[in-house]
Amino acid sequence: MPTSSRPAPASFLKHAADVASFYGFRPLREIERRVPNFERRAHSFATAANACAQSLSLHPGEPTLAYWASPSPMYIPATGFAPAGPRETGEFGLSIVGVPESIAEIVLLKTVATVITEWGAPIARVRLNALGDKDSKVRFEREVATYVRKHSGTLHEECRSKLSREPLAPYNCTDDSCKALVESGPRAMNFLSEKSRAHFKEVLELSERLALPYEFDDLLMGDERDPRMLFAFDLEGEDATVLGSNGGRFDDHFRTFAPRAETGGVSASIFFRKKGMSADNFKMVPSAQTPAVYFIQLGLRAKIEGLSVVDVLRQARIPVLQSFDSAKLTPQLSAARAAGVSHLLIMGQREALDGTVLVRAMNNSHQTIVVLSDLPRYLKTLK
């Protein structure tokens, strides 16, 4: 749909929430209700991180996928976006907390990419960078400190004054003198621990399956949330509503809200022009549609291929519940029973290879193997 014909930007939030719900995200208000006596505030990354982390602590083994909207973003990138001042910028946020595996980054990247492209804003590229765990960062910052001290005379004056407390300040600076210095400086990728390197490699490999136009950007930095990985979406041209998106893995930051090993997770923000929007536009509510099917995936391959299943159902306007964060059958079955769905869609490794889905009735366990292309038509015949 042409940009000029869209009733933006309020409809953008409705569109983004609709896409996010199909990929398993729920309004942040739902997550907050799972936390007794949670102090509700204006929604932001910090509110989402707090609510999701506390929910995970109260419900171990139940990762949270939340979306929210804010008229006042907390972390707007200094560069890389179309011009729009903070007062004109709104935020649609997504968080997955409690999933240490790379599937979290993939579901997040897929959701953001779908929101943006289906709105009509073509993506030029997705830039990715790995900064690694605490050990990786300690080694990198030590090397940076030595390098920057040797060349401090060429730094921008403001960065030079920050060095004692912010050794990475030149890497986050937009001044040409600092840019020139860091171009020849150390790179975080060269200091990754084996575990961090393996995780990032898996993210890149899985991103290829999504056919995302990604590229490695080892100077993508400058986020105060102590990220382990960062990404940024660059648009091909300027959109009337969407400005761009960024995010990453923020394990260490999430754990400041609830110190558990599994609290870590990923988050992303899509920034947009909010001109003409009221406060009510930012109140995210769940879809009125009640899903009749629950999609179960077993194994990493099924979870990756399962993203295509969700795409097919969403295009056919068939609502579905699913848990890309769950690796085992039992929790997914329990969630399906609790939701009261009439049918299960099951994809394991064989189904993922064959391009099929197993459809099982909840009342009598009758099951049928259905080719993915025929799935919407078949589901519409069920009662």
Image (cartoon, helix red, strand yellow):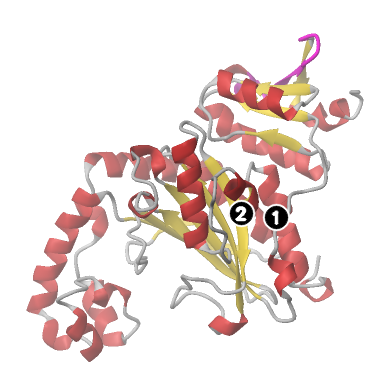
> What secondary structure is marked by label 2?
strand
Residue 124 x, y percent position in the rendering = 56, 64
Q: Nearer the viewer, residue 184 or 230?
A: 230
- Disc 2 marks a residue whose amino acid type is Tyr
Residue at position x 80%, y 13% in the image: 363
- Mark 2 or mark 1: whose residue is earlier in sequence: 1
Classed neighbour count for the residue bearing mark 2: other residues with Cα under 10 Å, few (<14), some (14–19), many (≥20):
many
Gap in Å between the C-alphas at discs 2 and 1?
7 Å
Which residue is disc 1 drawn over?
17
Give left or right: position of 268 versus 259: right
Q: Nearer the viewer, residue 9 or 284?
A: 284
Residue 312 x, y percent position in the rendering = 75, 38
Checking the image for residue 67, the label placed there is 2
Q: Quadrant of residue 298?
A: top right
Please identify the quadrant where the N terminus is shown: bottom right
| Residue 233 can be seen, yes or no | no
Residue at position x 78%, y 66% in the image: 11
Q: Look at the numbered discs 2 and 1 and tell me whether their residues touch, using CB distance below 8 Å.
A: yes
Residue 82 x, y percent position in the rendering = 56, 79
